[in-house]
Amino acid sequence: MGEPRITASVLKVLAGLLAEPGAQRYGLELMQQTGLPSGTLYPILARFERAGWVESSWEQIDPAAEGRPSRRYYVLTAEGAAVAQREVALMRRQMAPGPAGRVREA
């Protein structure tokens, strides 16, 4: 299927996951960090998983005992971390002031 297209929303999710690359993160946590709604976040995470950028697993709890549903956790793969670092760094270079990041005035 190929790599996901890099959009502003995709960059937000990559940057959010990259903030703690080895940490398992769940959807609500990522929604709060990125400001993206669930209808945007979860399709991005599904594309990341198909591309091999993240792996996911369900939390092993008793929902009745915990008083909440199980969470699905996402963690960057080595490939995903490399892509995230590359794309976030590229975006930062493009947004930086100076000759490389300067927008031409009309």
Image (spheres, rainbow, N blue to C red):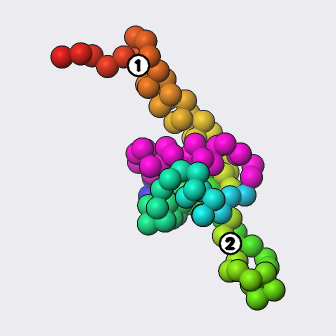
What residue is shown at x 53% (from left), y 50% (from top)? 34
**Residue that numbered label 2 is attached to:** 71
Q: Is residue 106 left or right of residue 35?
A: left
Looking at the rendered image, the quarter that the C terminus falls into is: top left
Q: Quadrant of the N terminus?
A: bottom left
The residue identified by callout 1 is: 101
Q: Is residue 13 in the magenta section? A: yes
Rendered residue at 50%/28% (across/down): 92
- Image: 60 above or below 7: below
Q: Position of residue 40 (x, y in %)?
A: 44, 61
Name the residue type under label 1: Gly
Q: Which residues are magenta?
A: 3-23
Residue 42 at what x, y percent from top left?
51, 64
x%, y% of residue 25? Answer: 68, 58
| Closer to the camera in the image, 80 or 25 | 25
Quick one: label 1 or label 2, which is nearer the N terminus? 2
Asked whether, in this view, residue 36 is left or right of residue 15, the answer is: left
* Placement of 78 over or under 45, stated as above or below: above
Q: Residues within 10 Å of mark 2 (few under 14, many from 20)?
A: some
* Mark 1: secondary structure: loop
Q: CA distance from mark 1 to mark 2?
A: 40 Å
Q: Is residue 62 above or below residue 25?
A: below
